[in-house]
Image (tube, grey):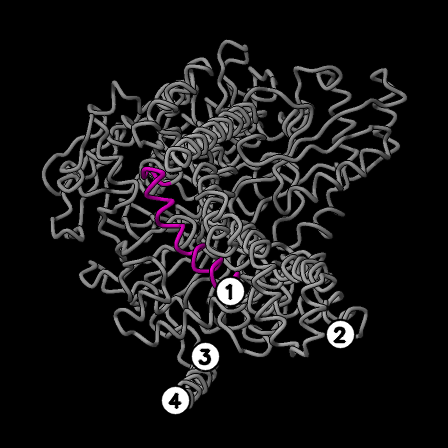
């Protein structure tokens, strides 16, 4: 049986590499076909042609496209994602610096949206077509259809500018900036590690609003999916049997229903998490959040294709890893998949 | 155990609520200045490389130059690192004051020489204004010399007069770097560029503590500054690209100055208590570039028709607001020697008659390209609307900075809205972008030049411009400047100045001593904050 798993694993890695290659190729081609001008971004608008040409050669942009792609691929295999035009740093370092901000925000958002969205969806399904169901539908529809940008600004106007409940854009108040040396890069954790509670609570006050807004937009999806998974199960014989035995609703949910929808739910949550991790671009811009989304937007604006391609690659890998992890979760959560593979 | 955790939870929740609210009330401390800005274009902190406006404001506070100017005293040149200077027929001799770099090294004449040589040899676009004036790589070392440790001699070329050389030395690109420190970091003959892009080696009133691209720039007061330590212990420039969010931060007191707001957000503060609107008058323009190499824009009558087909006053009032004012002469109204504005108001009948005379009674189709950025996008839409009244069917094409500039450089456009600047605060400084084109041929590929990009051949204007730039007699030069402006207006220009360009900022009234600099070289050493609420 073990051999089978290895073959399976090999097949999967092969698939992964192929999708990575296609991902890279597509991003690279789009990047080169777009009429952006990274050289102009570096040398400035008024540069004379000699300066311009020298920089073009330095960046290797004078070579034929296939050759540029080859150089790119080979250096990538050696772990070199190139140098970002914007910062002059290796792209990997930039991404390492930007990623924790996004990770912190996305993780908090996905936790919030799960904690609220899953119970909301289940309850809506239990009381199908009741006022509560309608209410849940409207709430999630609003979250799904109104642009995050609008929510961000309105949220800032209400909770930051008017009520003073939360901190404004940025990860932390400026006068606290630079007091805590980054260890993990996650500000909430770093500040706790050194025991600086002022920084910690300040960071909490800054992250809570963007996290809630992101959570709300993700919650719509999670609530809708949970509701339909639950509805499907409610009509199954085992639920009716449990009811007939006189089991309480709580018992039905925790003992029967949740384990049965867990597998589907994990996939939904993984997708939602991946979506948030890829950098909620708009939210990051509105909240001056120095994460991946903002990094990529800026890189794209100045035509910094090294940074864009590398960031795309990282996001692709994150999605694949999340997918892989949710597959692993299947094994744990669904006994049937275990039986098939062993 | 269960009870315990319940209490713990309640306690944590209470702590959260009580801790979050009071902290959210904290405003910026009185010894720190916080500027909300856009750091998106800040690509390099090497003073001999970075030219973008927000970069300039950072560099102006980290580095000193030999001389400086501000909008006070009618833009007069004043001492900075040079205590005084003597002008003779061949050049200028500068006498340096006693000053130290933040490394502790003294500022010497050799540092000044190194910095200027470095500027030319690095050969970035930052070097353009010196190279255009004959300070080229093969001659620079003989033109700039250290007489002794405290004396620098700079020879004049045919392309400069004392005034224009001095103004060139006020530019951010002429900042003096610590040559001892920079030379420690030279790799592959790069003059330390790789290192200096992200580090600092200056003698200015502030030192660079941290720069995180697209996030924040932190400057700290230089306690040993030769002119005394600045009042602000720390200056933070925070990336706040979303105008509405920046506006809220300003209203709440989390930032003191916002300089990347859209026109509607600036106007919110008009007359609002506790805030002031300021403007840096850049000396440059929002212009309309026409491609004179393409039919039918090659026809001067058509270009005149378009000049009469734009509602400048209307656009200035409704769209530009604090961003500028209408003006069609490429010299700002306030500058010495500026002539009166021509009557290029919106005159649709006249424009249609001109089009008919040119052979286009029924108009034609055009595209207008613009960077998708306030206020230029709205300007493009307004131009589209007013040109449709004279029978031209204009399509607006938006793009990001690199797309549009690439199209402009490649002469690939019909109409395009560039913005120009004045490299020095004089008539010759602002008009340069409109009357310089030494060789209009495609092979010349002079893509850094706005007139060349419009394929507009102007040998006569170019000759006059050269003459004026070399003329040392003030009266004769003033005459030439007037003549150039008149000839420009009479030549059916392909690059029309439309609006003087201002950079507006909104400032909390607690802050005193902040004066927006025409070249964005705003010094923060004299900025103070009152401790009131």
Residue under numbered circle 4: B4
At mark 1, the secondary structure is helix
What is the number of the mark on residue A111?
Answer: 1
Picture quadrant where residue A6 is located? top left
Residue under numbered circle 2: A132
Q: Which residues are magenta?
A: A87-111
What chain letter is assigned to the residue under label 1?
A: A
Q: CA distance from mark 4 to mark 2?
A: 34 Å
- On the same chain: label 2 and label 1? yes
Residue pictured at 47% horizontal, 41% vertical: A320
Q: CA distance from mark 4 to mark 3?
A: 24 Å
Residue under numbered circle 3: B20
The picture places residue A75, in percent across and down from the top left corner, at 33, 25
Q: Residues within 10 Å of mark 3 (few under 14, many from 20)?
A: many
At mark 3, the secondary structure is helix
Q: CA distance from mark 1 to mark 3?
A: 20 Å
Point out the image quarter for the C terminus of chain A.
top left
Q: Is residue B192 magenta?
A: no
Residues at discs 3 and 2 in contact (Cβ within 8 Å): no
């Amino acid at each position: 049986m073990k051999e089978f798993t290895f073959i399976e694993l090999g097949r999967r890695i092969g698939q992964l590499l192929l999708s990575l290659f296609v991902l890279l190729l597509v991003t690279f081609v789009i990047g080169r076909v777009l009429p952006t001008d990274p050289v102009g971004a570096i040398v400035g608008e008024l540069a004379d042609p000699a300066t311009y040409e020298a920089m073009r050669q330095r960046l290797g942009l004078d070579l034929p496209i296939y050759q540029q792609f080859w150089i790119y691929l080979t250096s990538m295999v050696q772990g070199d994602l190139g140098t970002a035009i914007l910062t002059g740093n290796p792209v990997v370092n930039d991404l390492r610096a930007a990623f924790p901000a996004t990770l912190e925000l996305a993780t908090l958002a996905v936790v919030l949206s799960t904690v609220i969205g899953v119970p909301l969806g289940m309850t809506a399904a239990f009381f199908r077509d009741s006022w509560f169901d309608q209410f849940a539908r409207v709430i999630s529809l609003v979250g799904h259809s109104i642009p995050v940008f609008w929510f961000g600004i309105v949220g800032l106007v209400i909770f930051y500018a008017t009520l003073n409940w939360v901190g404004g854009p940025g990860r932390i108040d400026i006068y606290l900036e630079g007091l805590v040396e980054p260890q993990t890069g996650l500000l909430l954790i770093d500040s706790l590690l050194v025991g600086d509670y002022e920084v910690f609570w300040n960071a909490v006050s800054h992250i809570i609003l963007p996290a809630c807004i992101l959570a709300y937009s993700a919650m719509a999806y999670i609530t809708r999916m949970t509701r339909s998974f639950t509805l499907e199960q409610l009509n199954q014989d085992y639920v009716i049997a449990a009811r007939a035995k006189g089991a309480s609703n709580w018992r039905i949910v925790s003992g029967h229903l949740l384990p049965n929808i867990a597998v589907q739910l994990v996939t939904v949550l993984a997708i939602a998490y991946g979506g948030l991790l890829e950098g909620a671009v708009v939210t990051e811009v509105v909240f001056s959040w120095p994460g991946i989304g903002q990094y990529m937007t800026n890189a794209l604006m100045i035509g910094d294709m090294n940074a864009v391609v590398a960031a795309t690659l990282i996001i692709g890998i994150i999605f694949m890893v999340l997918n892989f992890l949710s597959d692993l979760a299947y094994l744990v959560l669904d006994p049937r998949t275990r039986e098939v593979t062993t | 155990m269960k009870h315990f955790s319940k209490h713990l939870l309640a306690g944590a929740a209470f702590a959260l609520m009580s801790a979050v609210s009071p902290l959210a009330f904290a405003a910026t401390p009185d010894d720190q200045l916080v500027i909300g800005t856009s750091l998106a274009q800040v690509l390099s902190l090497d003073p001999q490389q970075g030219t973008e406006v927000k970069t300039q404001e950072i560099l102006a506070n980290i580095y000193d130059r030999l001389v400086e100017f501000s909008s006070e005293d009618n833009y007069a040149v004043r001492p900075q690192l040079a205590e005084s200077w003597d002008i003779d027929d061949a050049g200028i001799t500068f006498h340096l004051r006693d000053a130290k770099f933040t490394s502790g090294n003294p500022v010497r004449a050799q540092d000044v020489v190194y910095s200027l040589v470095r500027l030319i040899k690095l050969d970035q676009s930052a070097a353009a204004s010196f190279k255009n004036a004959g300070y080229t790589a093969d001659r620079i070392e003989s033109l700039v010399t250290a007489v002794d440790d405290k004396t620098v001699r700079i020879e004049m070329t045919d392309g400069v007069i004392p005034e224009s050389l001095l103004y060139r030395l006020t530019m951010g690109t002429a900042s003096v770097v610590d040559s001892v420190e920079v030379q420690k970091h030279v790799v592959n003959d790069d003059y330390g560029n790789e290192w200096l892009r992200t580090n600092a080696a200056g003698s200015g009133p502030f030192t660079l503590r941290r720069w995180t691209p697209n996030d924040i720039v932190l400057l700290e007061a230089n306690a040993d500054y030769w002119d005394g330590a600045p009042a602000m212990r720390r200056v933070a420039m925070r990336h706040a690209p979303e105008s509405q969010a920046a506006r809220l931060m300003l209203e709440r007191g989390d930032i003191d100055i916002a300089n990347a707001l859209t026109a509607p957000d600036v106007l919110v503060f008009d007359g609002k208590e506790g805030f002031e609107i300021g403007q840096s008058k850049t000396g440059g323009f929002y212009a309309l570039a026409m491609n004179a190499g393409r039919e039918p824009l090659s026809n001067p009558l058509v270009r005149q028709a378009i000049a009469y087909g734009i509602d400048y006053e209307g656009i200035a009032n409704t769209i530009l607001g604090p961003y500028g004012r209408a003006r069609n002469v490429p010299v700002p109204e306030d500058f010495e020697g500026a002539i009166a504005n021509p009557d290029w108001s919106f005159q649709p009948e006249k424009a249609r008659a001109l089009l008919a005379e040119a052979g286009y009674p029924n108009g034609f189709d055009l595209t207008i390209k613009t960077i998708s950025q306030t206020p230029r996008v709205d300007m493009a839409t307004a131009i589209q609307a007013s040109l449709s009244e004279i029978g031209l069917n204009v399509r607006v094409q938006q793009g990001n900075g690199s797309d549009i500039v690439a199209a402009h450089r490649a002469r690939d456009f019909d109409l395009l809205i560039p913005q120009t600047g004045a490299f020095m605060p004089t008539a010759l400084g602002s008009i340069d972008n409109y009357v310089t084109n030494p060789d209009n041929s495609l092979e010349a590929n002079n893509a850094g030049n706005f007139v060349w990009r419009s394929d507009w051949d102007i040998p006569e204007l170019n000759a006059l411009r050269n003459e004026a730039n070399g003329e040392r007699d003030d009266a004769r030069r003033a005459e030439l400047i007037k003549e150039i402006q008149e000839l420009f207006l009479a030549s059916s220009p392909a690059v029309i100045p439309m609006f003087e360009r201002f950079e507006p900022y909104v400032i909390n009234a607690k802050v005193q001593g902040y004066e927006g600099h025409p070249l964005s070289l705003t010094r923060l050493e004299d900025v103070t904050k009152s401790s009131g609420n």
